[in-house]
Amino acid sequence: AILLVAFVVIERQSRHPLVPFSIFRLRTLRGADIVGLLIGMSLFSMFFFISLYLQDVLHYSPIKTGVSYLPLAVGIILSAGAASQVVNRIGFKIPLIAGLLLIAGGLVWFSQVPAPGGSYAANILGPSLLAAVGLGFAFVPVTIAALTGTKPREAGLASGLINTSQQIGGALGLAILATVANSRTQSLFGQGIHDTSVALTKGYDRAFLVGAGFAVAGAIL
């Protein structure tokens, strides 16, 4: 917090600031950066909890867990290409809202993963593909929105700001959702549940639901 305050003070006094704060007068850029923050908060932690579920509950090896992400990665590539075409035709707002709602849907679906008795094909693959489509339809439009209305010399700054927003959102989201998941798991242990896989999964389920809330908030914004 001290460093952030110092950064603002120094930037405002500099003749050639790294981040001219006049760029935040652009309402679309401000909105895109906040939505980017919420995308990061909702989605980046998803990869963390899926990895934990696959390894700690389904007992996948790290290599098998990594390979399990291939359908999601392919889905993101294909949906991002489609999103760019859609944005060129109808603008960024509707695709962005649709992408965020798809992300929320994928996270709600993830919150239904069972323990014991879950499987990759039945409980992970479907919501992964849904979230992948949402991710492609969210990342492309929010980046375009962040650059809309900027001058050519401001494009690099605007691009850096949206990426920074997403990274900060990822860090904040993981901290918040890990706390939510751990609190839920510890509460279940306190209630007498001794099956570790059940307690962990219920914690992940709660975190996925809160993450879905972040995505819905982004869609509303």
Image (cartoon, rainbow, N blue to C red):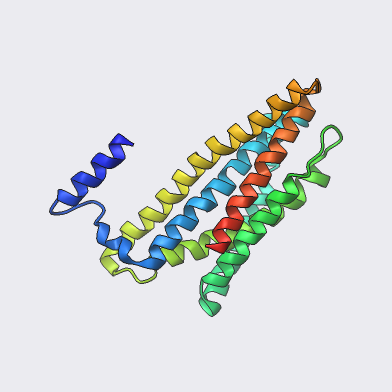
- Residue 204 percent coordinates (x, y): 69, 36
Give the residue at x 79% y 45%: 123
Q: Is residue 38 left or right of residue 106?
A: left
Q: Residue furthest left?
A: 15
Give the residue at x 80% y 20%: 194
Give the residue at x 62% y 35%: 180
Image quadrant assignment for residue 219: bottom right
Residue in the foreground of this view, choosing between 153 and 40: 40
Give the residue at x 49% y 39%: 171
- Residue 121 percent coordinates (x, y): 81, 45
Q: Is residue 69 visible?
A: no
Image quadrant assignment for residue 54: top right
Residue in the foreground of this view, choosing between 2 and 141: 2
- Above/below status of 152 relative to 1: below
Q: Is residue 13 left or right of residue 90?
A: left
Q: Is residue 208 left or right of residue 168?
A: right
- Residue 146 percent coordinates (x, y): 41, 63
Q: How many marks?
A: 0
| Quadrant into which the N terminus falls | top left
- Above/below status of 214 relative to 24: above
